[in-house]
Image (spheres, grey):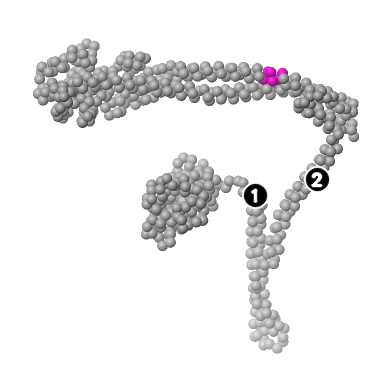
C-alpha cells in the first residue's frame, strides 16, 4: 500500500508541475504586459485626450469671441460716424429743406473718404429716399449699381425700430456680392431735441482682406455659406471655424471663416504617445525583473520538489524532503508535503465522512422528490372520499321491498319497476358526472403541485413578458373607473389594437389601479362627473400609454412623493396596490411610470412607457 501511494503521489506531482512551466510563465507575463499596456493606454487616453480637447474648445471659443468682437467694433465705428451726422442741426434743417450746398459739402467724395464709408443716404420717415450715394473707395467714382442695391435694401433695415433711447444701431448687410457694415441713426438737432425728421445711414464695405487685418490671421468673408455659419470643422491638424455675420433681423447674411492649427491636440497626442511609451518600457522592465525573481524564488524550488517526487516514484520509498528552513510559501509547501504521508489516514476518513454526508444530501433530495410525487395520489384519494348525495335511498328501498311482495297490482308493480330503473339510471349518470368532475379537480390539483414545485425558481426571476394588446387591456379595465360612487364618468380609449411587450396580469393590475385613482380624483373634485381619456402613441422602440383625467390633480412639486411607500393624498383611504407597487411593477417589466399635473384643479396625466415588439402582429391576432 505505501508503495502504490508513493507512485500515485509521484504521478500527481509530476502532472501538476509541467516541464514547460518557464515557457508558460513567459507567455503569461507577456500577456499581462500586453493587457496592462492596453489598459494603461486607454486610461491615459481617457484622461489626457478629453483634457486637451477641452482646452482646444476653450481656444475655439476665444477665437469666436475675438472674431465677434472685431465684427462688432467694425460696425460700431460706422455707427459712431453716422450718429455724428444724425445728431447734427445741419442734417435736421436739410431734412426739412434739402439744399444743394449741403449735399455738395456732406456727400462729397472727400467727405465720404474722410469718413471711410462707401455709401450714404438720407431717408424720410415714410421711407422715401431723400438722397443716396455710393462711391468706389479705390477710385472715388460713383457706383450707380451699388447705390440702387442700397436703396432697395432700405425697407429691410427696420428703420422704424429706432425710437426712444435707441436712436442708432448698426448691422451687416449683403448687397449683391458685397458685404457692408451699415450704421443708421435718427436725424435730430445737435442737442438731441426735436422730433426726428428721418434717418441717415452709412455703409462701409467689409472684405476678406479687411477681416484678415482685423483678426491678424488668414480669414475670408464667405457670402455663400451664411446658413452654415457658427460651425467648427475639425481636421487632423487644423480647425476650420465659421462665425456668422448677422443682418438687421438677426439672421446670418454671411460668415467669417478662418483656419487655426490644432496645436493643443497635437501636444496632447504627443504627450499621450510619450506617456504610453514610458509606461510600456517601465512595464517591460518590471516584468523582466519579475520573471527573473520568480525563476529564482519559485521555479528553482519547484524543480527540487519535482526531482524528489521522481526519486519517490522510482524507489517507492516515501522519504521526507530535506527542509531548507524557508519561512515563505515554498517552505510551507515542503512542510505540507512531509506531513502529507502521516495525514493520509485522516484524509481518507474525512473523505468517507464527506461521502456519507453527500449521500445524505442526495437522499434528502430524493426524498423531497418522492414526497412531491406522492402528493399526486392524494388527489385521487380525496376524489374517492368526496361524494355528493344521490337519490333518496329510503324511498328506493321501500320501492324494492314493495316489489318483493307479491300482493301488489300489476299497474302498481309496473310503476315501481319504472321508478327503480329510473333511479338506477340517474344514480349511474350522477356517478359518471361526479367522476368527470373529480377527474377535472385532480388535474387541477396536479397543476397546483407543478406551480408549487416551480415557485422557488420563479421567485427569483423577472415576470415573463409577452405580446399584449394595450387597447384590449384598457377596455377590460374600463368598468373600474366607469362610475365612482354616484359620479358618472365618460371614458374614451382607442379602438384599434396597440401592441407592447409586458406581463398581461401585472399590466392589467397597474392600469386598473390608475383608472381607479383617476375616478377617485374626479369624484373628489366636484362630484358631478368627469371624463377619462386614454391615448397610445408609438415612439420607435417604445410605446407610450397616457391616462388623462379632469380630476382634482396635484401640486407640480409633489411627483416624487406620490411613489413613496404608504404615501397618499387622501387621509381617509389606505391599502390598495398603490403607486409604489405600480412603479416597481413597471420597472420589473422594463418600463416606466410617471405622473404629471399642472396644479390642483387641472387634472392629472399618468404615462406608462413599455417596450415595443420587434414584429407587430397583423390584424386579427389576439393578445
Q: Is residue 374 visible?
A: yes
Question: Circle 2 is placed at which residue position?
Answer: 356
Whether 540 is drawn above or below 237: the answer is below
| Residue 115 horizontal side relative to residue 434, left or right | left
Quadrant showing the N terminus = top right
The Cα–Cα distance between marks 2 and 1, rounded to whole angstroms, is 27 Å
Residue nearest the observer in this picture, 328 or 396? 328
Q: Which residues are magenta?
A: 287-292
Whether 588 is drawn above or below 83: the answer is below
Where is residue 296 shown, x and y percent of the image? 75, 19
Residue nearest the observer in this picture, 55 or 1? 55
Residue nearest the observer in this picture, 507 or 101? 101
Q: Is residue 619 visible?
A: no
SS assignment at label 2: helix
Where is residue 181 shown, x and y percent of the image? 26, 21
Q: Could you tell me which residue is drawn at 88 percent across and 29 percent down?
A: 318
The verdict on residue 291 being magenta is yes
Q: Could you tell me which residue is drawn at 12 percent across and 22 percent down?
A: 94
| Residue 163 horizontal side relative to residue 572, left or right | left
Where is residue 399 shown, x and y percent of the image? 68, 82
Question: Circle 1 is placed at which residue position?
Answer: 456
Amino acid at each position: 500500500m505505501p508503495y502504490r501511494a508513493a507512485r500515485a503521489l509521484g504521478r500527481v506531482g509530476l502532472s501538476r508541475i509541467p516541464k514547460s512551466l518557464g515557457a508558460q510563465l513567459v507567455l503569461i507575463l507577456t500577456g499581462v504586459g500586453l493587457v496592462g499596456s492596453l489598459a494603461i493606454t486607454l486610461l491615459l487616453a481617457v484622461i489626457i485626450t478629453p483634457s486637451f480637447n477641452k482646452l482646444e474648445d476653450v481656444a475655439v471659443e476665444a477665437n469666436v469671441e475675438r472674431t465677434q468682437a472685431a465684427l462688432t467694433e467694425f460696425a460700431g465705428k460706422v455707427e459712431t460716424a453716422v450718429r455724428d451726422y444724425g445728431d447734427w442741426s445741419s442734417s435736421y434743417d436739410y431734412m426739412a429743406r434739402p439744399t444743394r450746398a449741403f449735399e455738395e459739402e456732406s456727400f462729397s467724395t472727400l467727405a465720404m473718404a474722410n469718413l471711410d464709408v462707401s455709401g450714404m443716404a438720407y431717408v424720410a420717415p415714410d421711407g422715401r429716399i431723400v438722397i443716396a450715394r455710393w462711391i468706389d473707395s479705390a477710385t472715388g467714382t460713383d457706383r450707380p449699381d451699388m447705390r440702387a442695391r442700397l436703396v432697395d435694401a432700405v425697407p429691410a433695415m427696420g428703420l422704424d425700430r429706432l425710437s426712444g433711447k435707441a436712436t442708432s444701431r448698426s448691422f451687416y448687410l449683403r448687397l449683391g456680392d458685397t458685404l457692408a457694415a451699415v450704421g443708421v441713426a435718427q436725424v435730430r438737432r445737435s442737442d438731441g431735441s426735436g422730433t426726428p425728421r428721418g434717418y441717415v445711414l452709412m455703409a462701409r464695405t467689409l472684405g476678406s482682406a479687411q477681416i484678415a487685418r482685423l483678426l491678424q490671421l488668414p480669414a475670408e468673408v464667405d457670402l455663400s455659406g451664411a446658413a452654415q455659419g457658427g460651425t467648427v470643422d475639425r481636421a487632423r491638424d487644423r480647425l476650420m471655424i465659421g462665425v456668422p455675420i448677422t443682418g438687421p433681423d438677426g439672421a446670418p447674411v454671411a460668415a467669417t471663416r478662418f483656419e487655426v492649427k490644432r496645436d493643443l491636440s497635437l501636444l496632447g497626442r504627443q504627450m499621450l504617445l510619450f506617456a504610453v511609451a514610458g509606461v510600456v518600457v517601465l512595464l517591460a522592465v518590471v516584468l523582466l525583473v519579475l520573471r527573473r525573481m520568480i525563476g529564482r524564488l519559485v521555479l528553482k524550488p519547484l524543480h527540487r520538489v519535482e526531482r524528489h517526487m521522481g526519486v519517490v516514484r522510482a524507489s517507492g520509498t516515501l522519504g521526507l524532503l530535506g527542509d531548507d528552513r524557508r519561512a515563505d510559501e515554498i517552505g510551507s509547501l515542503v512542510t505540507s508535503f512531509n506531513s502529507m504521508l502521516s495525514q493520509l489516514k485522516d484524509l481518507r476518513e474525512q473523505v468517507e465522512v464527506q461521502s456519507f454526508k453527500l449521500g445524505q444530501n442526495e437522499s434528502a433530495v430524493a426524498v423531497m422528490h418522492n414526497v412531491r410525487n406522492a402528493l399526486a395520489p392524494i388527489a385521487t384519494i380525496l376524489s374517492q372520499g368526496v361524494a355528493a348525495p344521490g337519490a333518496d335511498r329510503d324511498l328506493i328501498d321501500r320501492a324494492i321491498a314493495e316489489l318483493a311482495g307479491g300482493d301488489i297490482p300489476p299497474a302498481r308493480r309496473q310503476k315501481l319497476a319504472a321508478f327503480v330503473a329510473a333511479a338506477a339510471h340517474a344514480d349511474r349518470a350522477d356517478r359518471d358526472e361526479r367522476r368527470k368532475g373529480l377527474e377535472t379537480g385532480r388535474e387541477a390539483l396536479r397543476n397546483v403541485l407543478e406551480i408549487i414545485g416551480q415557485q422557488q425558481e420563479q421567485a427569483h426571476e423577472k415576470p415573463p413578458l409577452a405580446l399584449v394588446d394595450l387597447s384590449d387591456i384598457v377596455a377590460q379595465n374600463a368598468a373600474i373607473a366607469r362610475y365612482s360612487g354616484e359620479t358618472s364618468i365618460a371614458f374614451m380609449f382607442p379602438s384599434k389594437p396597440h401592441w407592447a411587450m409586458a406581463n398581461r396580469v401585472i399590466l392589467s393590475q397597474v392600469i386598473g389601479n390608475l383608472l381607479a385613482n383617476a375616478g377617485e380624483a374626479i369624484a373628489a373634485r366636484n362630484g358631478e362627473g368627469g371624463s377619462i381619456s386614454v391615448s397610445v402613441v408609438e415612439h420607435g422602440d417604445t410605446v407610450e400609454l397616457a391616462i388623462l383625467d379632469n380630476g382634482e390633480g396635484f401640486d407640480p412639486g409633489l411627483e416624487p412623493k406620490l411613489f413613496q411607500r404608504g404615501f397618499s393624498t387622501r387621509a381617509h383611504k389606505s391599502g390598495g396596490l398603490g403607486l409604489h407597487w405600480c412603479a416597481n411593477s413597471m420597472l420589473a417589466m422594463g418600463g416606466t411610470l410617471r405622473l404629471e399635473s399642472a396644479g390642483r384643479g387641472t387634472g392629472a396625466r399618468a404615462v406608462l412607457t413599455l417596450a415595443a415588439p420587434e414584429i407587430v402582429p397583423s390584424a386579427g391576432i389576439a393578445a
